Amino acid sequence: MNKDVPVLRVQDLTKHFPAGRGKVVHAVDNVSFQIPRGKTFGLVGESGCGKSTCARTIIRIYEPTGGKVYLGHDDISILSQKELLPHRQRMQMIFQDPYASLNARMTVHDIIAEPLRAHGVFASRQEESERVNDMLAQVGLNREHASRYAHEFSGGQRQRVGIARALIIHPELVICDEPISALDVSIQAQIVNMLRKFQQEQALTYLFIAHDLSMVRYVSDEVGVMYLGQLVETCAADEIYATPLHPYTQGLLAAIPIPDPKVAREKRAAGLEGDLPSPIDPPSGCRFHTRCPHATERCKAEVPSLKDVGAGHCVACHLIND
Amino acid sequence: MNNRWERVSLSQEESERIFRKARSFAGDVWFRFRRKPTALLGLILALLMVLFGLIGPFMTPYNYSQQETKLANIPPLMTVYPGPDDSYFFVTEALKVIEVDPEGHLVRQLRKKEDDAKHKQTSFKYDDDTSVVLDYSIKPYVMLDEYGQRIEQGVRKWNASHLLGTDHLGRDILTRLMYGARISLMVAFIAATVNMLIGILYGGVSGYLGGRTDAIMMRVVDIIATIPLTLYVILIKVCLDDGLISIIVALSSVYWVDMARVVRGQVLSLKNQEFVLAARTIGSSTKNILLRHLIPNAMGPILVTVTMLIPSAIFMEAFMSFIGIGIAPPMASLGTMCNDATEALRTNPYQLFLPAIAICIIMFAFNFIGDGLRDALDPKLKK
């Protein structure tokens, strides 16, 4: 495959949910980004901003309302579930809750072998077993663990089982939906390092969803900030710390706890205020104008578009774009 | 002393070790189930009833339809008159005299020697020399020996030939109870299995597909459920022939609605859990998702519903047989036995009590099991 073609290209992806009485939840609106091979795209935002919906729409747990999703050359957003089946091998997902994402009635062996069986990779049980044991070793578990049930494992071990399940059929794209937010801090590092190790070994492409900006900076090459279903800023991971442009990104960064109390006291004022508005009836114009300290009349009336302000740094804000 | 706070190095192997005993889901459930005495009692009773119904008929010399009218209505505990040579006499309701040996076996019926209608006395021949006389000129009747001396009644003997007595046609009640229990359990298990299959399939499909399909399928269930199920069963039964199969058809075609609702509810709550979403992103087929993910995880409530369905199916069969649209005679069913016994309730109450007790035991047993299973399957009660 051509190296220049991004592994994942999302174009104007939109997902609306019916909310009854003709109302619509605008979960994801016109989100566009792309991820080159072997890179990680970090998607951050508050709870309820549509990160997970975006991921689930890409992998077609939800049917997109509009927009296109290209996996390599193929537009997978127009395929039926049946036509999509062969492409499912190429993208896998790691879930947030290691307790809910593993079937309690299946052994770890069966859980990890499920993708192999679904795609008929191996004809014989023996080959399958070898591959599963090999995968277990790669995630730091051993073959005795294969016959155990998921509820016997700790959170970190379960999440590694989830990773093994996602990686066993060698996907190109792995969507990590907050894979570490349910884990202890010490385990988080372990899991993230494991994900990085696999990325280097197999040139994996990650879509990494998190609400923890500091962790996202560590794992991502590029970061996208979402607010109320829309991408408001995308740029290289380091740059988002150095020069955050969108007022929302600045607010998010200000909300990161600072270990030094002196510095923390000086910075407190800049934090975000107010709650996330309802996605059923999103604010007009720029969706952030209800909480933005710099909002003008224009922000209420006109929707800002995501524009490149230089060196691949894109922002959707009237104040910056002019 | 060395430094007690020295760091202990832990190998990778050791830090990943699981100390907990490996135990499968079924093992876990059994572990909790057996700690509940009522549940265990229910299980033992149910197993005993199953053995009683399955093996019992092979252990008895009688048959469910074998009649012996001269031995009709003999109770399990007989009040007998002492006779010559260690023998005893038992007088039946029809004023027949039966010889009973010391162990309580019914030996033979004494031949009538002379019927003196004038004195209201009947003499029965014991052997060539001796005879006994039944004097029914006074009430209640008395037994006289051949010299006219009154024989005192007073010895009670357990009926060794028919342990639980005989019914109005002289059929052995114990044997008929065995066949009755067999029919009840068979009806219950087949109806429960069929209901489980239909219910799981219907509820599973309805819950998994959701949306409009779900709405239509559940309205069908609602319509079936609004009319009392008993009425359906009776109507279906009236249209079909008598017999076991039609009872099973009648029960199976109606009782699955509860199961369908339970399964649908479970599937609805499970299908959006992450492990099911994971299976979908993996690309597992719908069949696999239903059979390997959804139904095994819904198995707890399904099992409880089934064990609760068994007693109601047993009761329904007994009820239908009781009102005369169930099992066709002469086949024994607990319900028909109760029905037969109502006519002679005042004189022979044991004929009603015995099958009634059998129904109670079976229903108790399965209710206890269902109760115990519900607790054992509830992960919140896990210790």
Image (tube, coloured by chain):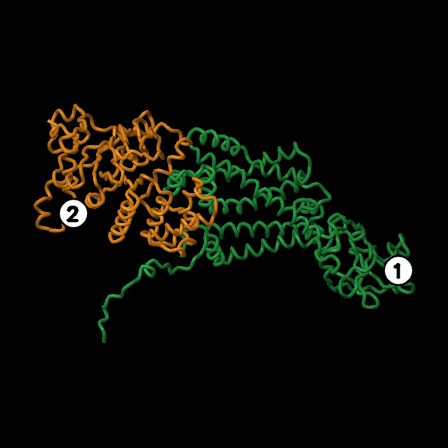
Chain colours: A orange, B green
Does A143 sit above or below residue A230? below
Q: Residue at x 18, y 40 (%)?
A: A237
Residue A257's tag is 2
Q: Which residue corresponds to the image point at 91% horizontal and 65% vertical from the top-left? A: B129
Left or right for B160, reference B149 = left
Along the line of sight, which residue is nearer the eye, B364 or B94?
B364
Res. A25 mark: none
- Residue for badge 1: B125
Q: Quadrant of the N terminus of chain A?
A: top left
Q: Residues within 10 Å of mark 1 (few under 14, many from 20)?
A: some
Q: Is A301 on the left or on the right of B131, as rendered? A: left
Q: Nearer the viewer, residue A72 or B186?
A: A72
- Residue placed furthest toward the front: A2
Instruction: Pick the quarter of the image with the C terminus of chain A.
Output: top left
Q: Secondary structure at mark 2?
A: loop
Q: Front-most of B335 and B219? A: B219
Q: Amino acid type of disc 1? A: Lys
Q: Position of residue A13 (x, y in %)?
A: 28, 29
The subunit carrying tag 2 is A
Q: Is residue B306 left or right of residue A44?
A: right
x and y, in percent, of residue A141 in the image: 35, 54
Image quadrant where residue A234 sits: top left
Q: Nearer the viewer, residue A241 or A291?
A: A241
Task: State which chain disc 1 sits on.
Answer: B
- Figure quadrant of residue A171: top left
Q: Does the rendering let one see residue A220?
A: yes
Residue type indicated by callout 2 = Pro
How far apart marks 1 and 2 lie (CA) works out to 111 Å
